Amino acid sequence: MSRKNILILIAFLVLLAPACSDENDVDSIKPTIDISFDDAFPKNCETLYFGEAFVLKLRFSDNAELGSYSIDIHNNFDHHSHSTEVTECDMDPVKEPVNPFVFIDDYSIPKGLSEYETSVSISIPSESGGALLDEGDYHFFISLTDKEGWSAQKGLSIKILHR
């Protein structure tokens, strides 16, 4: 083989080498949110109560490493939808919010975990600004992000009522 052909072959192999890298190192799989186990809370169509706390019980998993999650609770008085659940819940009539409850919070997950179960106590106040909060239909929106930035969401329909 001539020197020219050998140089061309070496150049070709050098250019080809990066294309042969192990693609399994790239995390391209979204994390998962599990609410199907017995102790999971809340589940779709659950009722929560103003002035009380509840323990958030969710299971998260990822093929590589989990990152963080957030919870967003907001009114659904206009019956908008971003539920990811198949089950439809009984809805109150459409109404205008007067003093709706809003909760948005972010939570970290300890580094290095590919599975994690939450156990966070969340308190729902009964009033804001001296006035009772609006009871009725709310969305409980969960967003989970893995270390690489892939995310999964789960939107649940719940009711929040005064006892």
Image (cartoon, grey):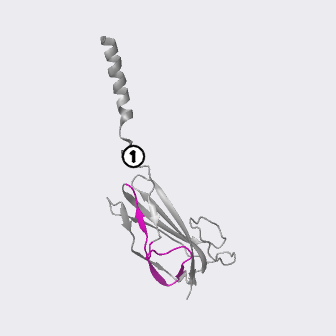
For the point 49% across and 75% down, which residue is it? 42
Task: Say what secondary structure mark 1 lies in.
Answer: loop
Image position of 151 with respect to 104: above or below = above
Image position of 61 with respect to 157: above or below = above
Image position of 56 with respect to 18: above or below = below
Please tell me which residue lies in front, 19 or 47. 19
Query: Where is residue 122 shown, x and y percent of the image?
Result: 44, 77
The kind of residue on which mark 1 rests is Val
Apparent side of residue 56 relative to residue 135 in the rendered image (left or right): left
Q: Report the magenta residues as a range.
A: 37-63
Q: Quadrant of residue 146?
A: bottom left
Q: Which residue is mark 1?
A: 26
Query: Where is residue 1 shown, x and y percent of the image?
Result: 30, 12
Residue 2 sits inside the magenta stretch: no
For the point 34% across and 26% down, which residue is it? 14
Q: Residue furthest top?
A: 2
Image position of 110 with respect to 39: above or below = above
For the point 54% across and 66% down, which residue is it? 155
For the point 47% across and 70% down, which residue is it? 36
Query: Where is residue 163 shown, x and y percent of the image?
Result: 55, 89
How many circles with numbers are drawn on the protein? Answer: 1
Residue 41 sits inside the magenta stretch: yes
Q: Residue furthest front?
A: 1
Q: Quadrant of residue 94?
A: bottom right
